[in-house]
Image (cartoon, grey):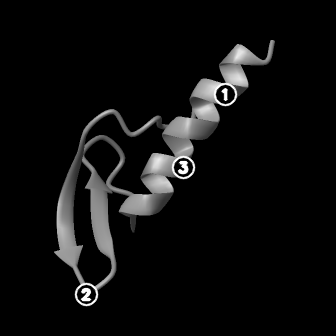
C-alpha cells in the first residue's frame, strides 16, 4: 500500500488577505497553510500519546 505523503517540502503558491496556500513538492497536493500547521501538530501529539 502507498504510504500517505507527510509533505516534507512545501512552497507558497498563493496568498489572499487572510489565507496562504502551499503546494507539496513531493505529491503536488495544494492546501491552506493553516491545515499544514495543523497536520504537523496532530502528528507530534499523536506520536506522543502511544
Question: To which residue does mark 1 refer?
Answer: 45
Q: How crowded is mark 1: few (under 14 residues within 10 Å), some or many (20 or more)?
A: few
Q: How crowded is mark 3: few (under 14 residues within 10 Å), some or many (20 or more)?
A: few
Q: Which of 41 and 29 is in front in this view?
A: 41
Q: Residues within 10 Å of mark 2 (few under 14, many from 20)?
A: few
Q: Work out which quarter of the rendered image holds the N terminus and state it.
A: top right
Residue 39 rendering spot, x and y as whole percentages: 54, 44
Residue 41 rendering spot, x and y as whole percentages: 55, 38
**The quarter of the displayed image where residue 13 is located:** bottom left
Residue depicted at 25% across the width and 85% down the height? 16
Left or right, 48 with respect to 37, comes to right
Q: Work out which quarter of the rendered image holds the C terminus and state it.
A: top right
Q: Which of 37 and 29 is in front in this view?
A: 37
* Cα separation between marks 3 and 2: 20 Å
Question: To which residue does mark 2 refer?
Answer: 17
Residue depicted at 45% across the width and 48% down the height? 37
Q: Which of marks 3 and 2 is nearer the N terminus?
A: 2
Name of the residue lying farthest toward the bottom: 17
Question: To which residue does mark 3 refer?
Answer: 38
Residue 17 rendering spot, x and y as whole percentages: 25, 87
Amino acid at each position: 500500500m502507498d504510504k500517505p505523503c507527510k509533505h516534507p517540502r512545501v512552497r507558497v503558491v498563493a496568498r489572499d488577505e487572510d489565507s496562504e496556500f502551499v503546494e507539496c513538492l513531493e505529491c503536488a497536493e495544494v492546501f491552506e497553510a493553516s491545515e499544514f500547521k495543523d497536520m504537523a501538530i496532530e502528528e507530534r501529539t499523536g506520536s506522543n500519546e502511544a
